[in-house]
Image (cartoon, helix red, strand yellow):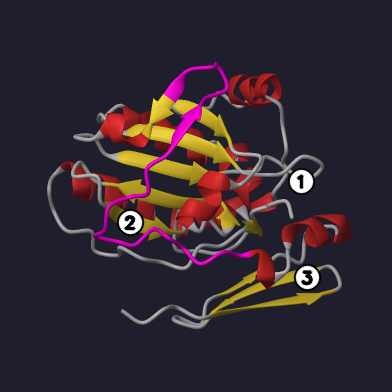
Amino acid sequence: MKATKSLLGITTGVFLLLTASNGAISNASNLTNTENKNAIQSSSEIRVAAARVNNPAPNFVAADTNGKTHRLTDFKGKVVVLEWTNHDCPFVRKHYGSGNMQKLQKELTGKGAVWISIISSAPGMQGYVSASQANELTKSRNAAPTAVILDPEGKIGKQYGARTTPHIFVIGKDGNVGYMGAIDSIASPDPADIPKADNYVRDAVNSLISGKPVANSVTQPYGCSVKYGS
């Protein structure tokens, strides 16, 4: 499988994400200059993904924001969604502000899937929060993840090669990665695009629950870069 190539370009007040595989362009010209600055990191900080579709998902052991320890291997036999998030990212705000992410969380966990939100923002970087702040965000947004894990050292994010917020990985009942990429097919920060987009995550989870192949197992993630530390 050939790796999808992408080119990130920055112009004043404009954030463009060009996906070479399908020519899709996301124009975030409605963002402020500060948001644009926070939305991009040096490509040298993007790590090569360790996660590979149809291969075992990298295991991790981490405590959630309520102090409960989770091991990925504990969820074998269930479909698991890993969602990289950053509440200050306009692309994340698109899905949470509209209620789309919360709806998806409730729908899929209602079908037996496990949903883990992961925050890999380093201290002092955009999106960094304490455990109590993360819990308040979950409550105030009426979000419904199974757990929220803080990853300020970026260990889990780098294990998976998480590049953007959101960036989503779906793990099948067999413990193998079944899907990795974007939440949906329209790479923009505009909530009006949500009803028009194909939701890759919903499709992947439904396929894996029913034991069917995932039609689009790898897609180009879009959003703000994960704010890893040095």
Residue at screen point 51% across, 45% down: 156
Give the secondary structure at mark 3: strand
Residue at screen point 61% across, 47% down: 154
- Residue 128 spot, x, y in % from top left: 73, 38
| First along the sequence among labels 1 and 3 | 3
- Residue 71 spot, x, y in % from top left: 38, 31
Determine whether 216 is above or below 66 in the image: below
> Mark 2 belongs to which amino acid?
Tyr
Which quadrant, please, contains the N terminus? bottom left
Determine whether 135 is above or below 12 in the image: above
- Residue 107 spot, x, y in % from top left: 34, 32
| First along the sequence among labels 1 and 2 | 1
- Dominant secondary structure of the magenta stretch? loop
Neighbours of disc 3 within 10 Å: few (<14), some (14-19), many (20+): some
> Mark 1 belongs to which amino acid?
Gln
Give the secondary structure at mark 2: strand
- Indicate left or right for 185 with 213 as reference: right
Determine whether 213 is above or below 110 in the image: below
Q: What segment carries the magenta color?
A: 46-69
Residue extending farthest to the left is 211
Q: Which mark is residue 14?
A: 3
Q: What distance separates the C-alpha of mark 2 from that of mark 3? A: 30 Å
- Indicate left or right for 126 with 8 as reference: right
- Which callout, 2 or 3, points to the residue nearer the camera? 2
- Indicate left or right for 81 with 211 as reference: right
Queried whether the magenta region covers residue 50, the answer comes back as yes
Report the front residue among 178 and 57: 57
Neighbours of disc 1 within 10 Å: few (<14), some (14-19), many (20+): some
Q: Write down the residue under mark 1.
A: 126
Q: Which mark is residue 142?
A: none
